[in-house]
Image (cartoon, grey):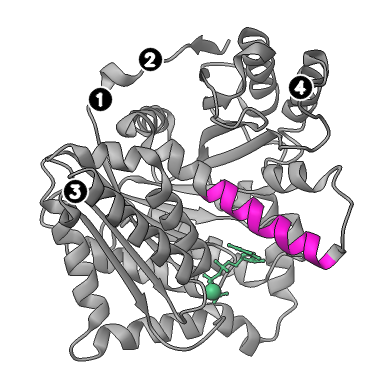
């Protein structure tokens, strides 16, 4: 039987600082998500806190937004009397490219490290050094999209290089975003990328060790994509699709970072502890961003609460349809944070979510669930951050799909994916 533990976890751990490196467009999106959380300002109020943020891409195109947010945050720190140097922001554009294959990205990364003097090497050293000045415990994240070229190509080498820069034990968490069905066919390179991170996160001993000492999260975006695209059919298709892409990706990245910093990191601490307890070594955690309502879609402000309840319930029922996991995957723990207006009926929703998680993802014996409730500042949006530990790449539906795309490539094309 699964046991439900309603979680006030704050007593379990003190405040944490979260720092992040983002590589490629999605990586930069995670970092701007971190910089935009109000909580990061609260964390930085503590004079013992230090936060570092580093974004790396191969061109300037996808870096403008994160630069803007970093400038805005620095300004707000000054306004609040927080020394601006407690936040270290660095932004590196390595070339003038748009998209690269994974092999090209690796080559560019390696060249950038060998350049004399290497701005990349210096940036990693500055990032690590800044974090180590904090008197509070810190975590560092390395964020990227598993389906792209730049981020997925560079993150493995970068994670090893970063490990070499720390003189203290700072847990490093990998955060790899998965593509969703709106991205089109699963790219063949995703097979090489998932395989590489799977083997990297299991490597131990003989000069090889897992650089993601704090764990590895894969971020599922499908539920959020489905929630946004169902019931919205107006406007020009191409414009609609582009906006949906942006909204889906941003919502997932922002939600992940809100989860990571909420309660000064206590929620993440709890999820990571529970995962470590239940986890077989090196296995990944799924961060399933399950979105239940989106402003103005399917149910409108002023409509009966019973309709809101019905819609949320319908989208809880979709959890297994859009989890990205193979049907036979089972975890022994689920950690969920539900965000929904109180008037919808918290106990009812929790019960529904708990039953669905048990039925769809948990093993029948020795499993546990933690479900917390929060209210999102926008009452028209409801969603859940769900952590399911214990998966490997082969548990993801997209892995087999990517493998079959990869198998159809010529040897030369396969090499570009490596
Ligand atoms: N973040 C974001 N991702 C998108 C968007 N449109 C498509 N994607 C998907 O994001 C994945 C690629 O991830 P990116 O983060 O753009 O890749 P990258 O690391 O910059 O690597 P490159 O492929 O070299 O640009 C693919 O699955 C795309 O289909 C968007 O507007 N924003
Ligand atoms: Mg890119």
Residue 192 lies in quadrant = bottom right
Which element carries disc 3, helix, strand or loop?
A: loop
Cβ–Cβ below 8 Å for labels 3 and 2?
no
Residue 412 lies in quadrant = bottom right
Which element carries disc 2, helix, strand or loop?
A: loop
- Say whether disc 4 or disc 2 marks the residue closer to the N-terminus: 2
Residue range (magenta): 238-253
- Say whether disc 3 or disc 1 marks the residue closer to the N-terminus: 1
Instruction: Determine whether 25 is above or below 285 in the image.
Output: below
Label 3 vs label 1, nearer the camera: 3
Is 393 or 301 nearer to us in this picture?
A: 301
Please give the residue where the numbered disc 2 appears in the rendered image.
Answer: 8
Please give the residue where the numbered disc 4 appears in the rendered image.
Answer: 313
Label 3 vs label 4, nearer the camera: 3
What residue lies at 61% left-to-right and 72% top-to-bottom?
189
Please give the residue where the numbered disc 3 appears in the rendered image.
Answer: 50
Query: Dot 1, how many residues are within 10 Å of its Cα: few (below 14), some (14-19), or many (20+)?
Result: few
Where residue 156 appears, as percent x and y from the top left, is 39, 67
Q: CA distance from mark 3 to mark 4?
A: 41 Å
Which element carries disc 4, helix, strand or loop?
A: helix
Cβ–Cβ below 8 Å for labels 1 and 2?
no
Instruction: Determine whether 177 is above or below 110 in the image.
Output: above
Label 3 vs label 2, nearer the camera: 3
Q: Which mark is residue 89?
A: none
What residue lies at 39% left-to-right and 66% top-to-bottom?
67
Is 178 or 247 nearer to us in this picture?
A: 247
Q: Is residue 172 part of the magenta span, yes or no?
A: no
Please give the residue where the numbered disc 1 appears in the rendered image.
Answer: 13
């Amino acid at each position: 039987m699964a046991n439900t533990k309603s979680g006030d976890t704050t007593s379990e751990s003190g405040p944490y600082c979260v720092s992040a490196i983002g590589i490629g467009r999605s990586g930069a999106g995670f970092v701007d998500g971190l910089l935009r959380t109000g909580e990061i300002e609260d964390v930085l109020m503590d004079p013992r806190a230090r936060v570092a943020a580093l974004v790396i891409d191969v061109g300037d195109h996808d870096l403008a937004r994160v630069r803007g947010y970093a400038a805005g945050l620095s300004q707000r720190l000054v306004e609040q009397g927080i020394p601006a140097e407690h936040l270290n922001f660095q932004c590196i554009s390595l070339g003038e490219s748009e998209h690269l294959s994974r092999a090209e990205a690796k080559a560019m990364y390696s060249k950038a490290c060998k350049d004399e003097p290497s701005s990349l090497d210096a940036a990693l050293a500055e990032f690590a050094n800044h974090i180590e000045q904090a008197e509070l415990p810190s975590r560092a994240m390395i964020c990227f999209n598993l389906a792209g070229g730049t981020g997925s190509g560079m993150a493995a080498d970068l994670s090893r290089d970063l490990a070499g820069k720390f003189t203290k034990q700072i847990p490093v968490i990998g955060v790899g975003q998965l593509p969703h069905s709106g991205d089109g066919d699963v790219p063949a390179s995703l097979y090489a990328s998932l395989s590489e991170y799977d083997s990297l996160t299991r490597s131990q001993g003989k000069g090889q060790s897992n650089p993601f000492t704090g764990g590895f999260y894969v971020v599922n975006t499908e539920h959020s994509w489905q929630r946004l695209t169902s019931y919205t059919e107006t406007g020009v298709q191409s414009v609609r699709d582009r906006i949906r892409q942006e909204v889906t990706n941003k919502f997932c990245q922002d939600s992940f970072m809100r989860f990571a910093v909420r309660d000064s990191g206590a929620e993440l601490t709890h999820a990571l502890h529970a995962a470590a307890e239940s986890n077989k070594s090196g296995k990944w955690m799924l961060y399933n961003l399950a979105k239940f309502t989106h402003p103005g879609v399917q149910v409108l402000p002023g409509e009966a609460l019973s309709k809101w309840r019905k819609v949320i319930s319908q989208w809880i029922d979709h959890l297994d349809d859009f989890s990205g996991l193979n049907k036979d995957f089972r975890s022994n723990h689920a950690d969920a944070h539900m965000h929904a207006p109180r008037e919808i009926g918290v106990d009812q929703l929790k019960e529904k979510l708990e039953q669905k998680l048990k039925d769809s993802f948990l093993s029948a014996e020795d499993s546990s669930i933690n479900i917390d409730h929060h209210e999102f500042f926008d009452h028209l949006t409801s969603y859940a951050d769900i952590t399911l530990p214990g998966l490997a790449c082969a548990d993801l539906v997209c892995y087999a799909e990517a493998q079959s795309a990869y198998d159809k490539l010529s040897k030369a094309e396969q090499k570009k994916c490596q």
